[in-house]
Amino acid sequence: YTAAEQGRWRQLYARQSTLLAGRACDAFLDSLARLDCAGRIPDLDRQGEPLARSTGWRLVAVPGLIPDEAFFAHLAARRFPVTVWLRGADEFDYIVEPDIFHDFFGHVPMLAVPAIADFVAAFGAACLRARGEEVRRRLSRLYWYTIEFGLVREGDGVRAYGAGLLSSPAELRHAVESPQAVRLPFDPERMMESEFRIDGFQSRYFVAD
């Protein structure tokens, strides 16, 4: 990585970490604190070692989005694909495809949480077993509204545990604090029937107890 990319990582990390208190769930905060990644883009092999010891997950470097079958196979085998490119300065606030900041900062801390670690592996295995595009679409919505944009009721309010929220400055505040955000009770069937957005804030969020 270039010096400019390392600097951009530090900027992204510093900005997002200042927003986490009162908005991110305790499990994420605890796991992030154990990762040594504030000062530079993380080394995936080194960072993956404690994760492998705690929940059996390893980190796999990938150039970008990979085919669904390969993605599901990695998840089922407890290997999390981490995109290695970092967003440019012109994409600082929003990117369409995940980069290393979203994948590592957003996802990796929660993979140290046993319930999330088991769920993501089970999701990968279920997708490999699934027959038909409609079944996979339903499963992808379940993943979207939990692992990417999930909220959990904790303490005196709701907190984020989804990577799409934890790595986004604007939507994290919106999902947790905005009176306009629609927050629904955790309901897997409704999740699997609900379309989601990739071009703006979600129209709804589901809150686990």
Image (tube, rainbow, N blue to C red):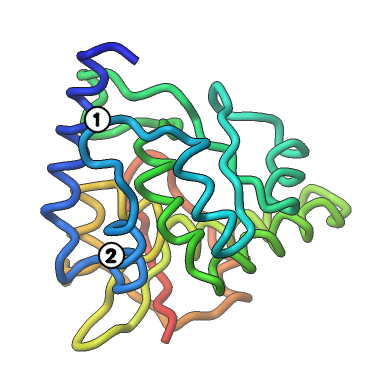
Rendered-image quadrant of the C terminus: bottom left
Q: Residue at x 36, y 59 (%)?
A: 203
**Label placed on residue 9:** 1
Residue 108, placed above or below residue 199 = below
Rendered-image quadrant of the N terminus: top left
Using residue 89 as the reference point, say whether residue 96 is left or right of it.
right
Residue 185, placed above or below residue 64 = below
Q: Is mark 1 on a helix, strand or loop?
A: helix
Q: Which residue is drawn at 44% across and 41% down?
A: 103
Name the foreground residue: 25 vs 131.
25
**What type is the residue that disc 2 sits on?**
Leu
Which residue bears the numbered disc 2?
29
Q: Where is residue 158 in the image (x, y as percent from the top left)?
A: 27, 78
Using residue 58 as the reference point, say whether residue 146 is left or right of it.
left
Q: Which residue is drawn at 45% across and 51% down?
A: 108
Camera sees residue 145? no
Q: Which residue is drawn at 71% across and 44% down?
A: 74
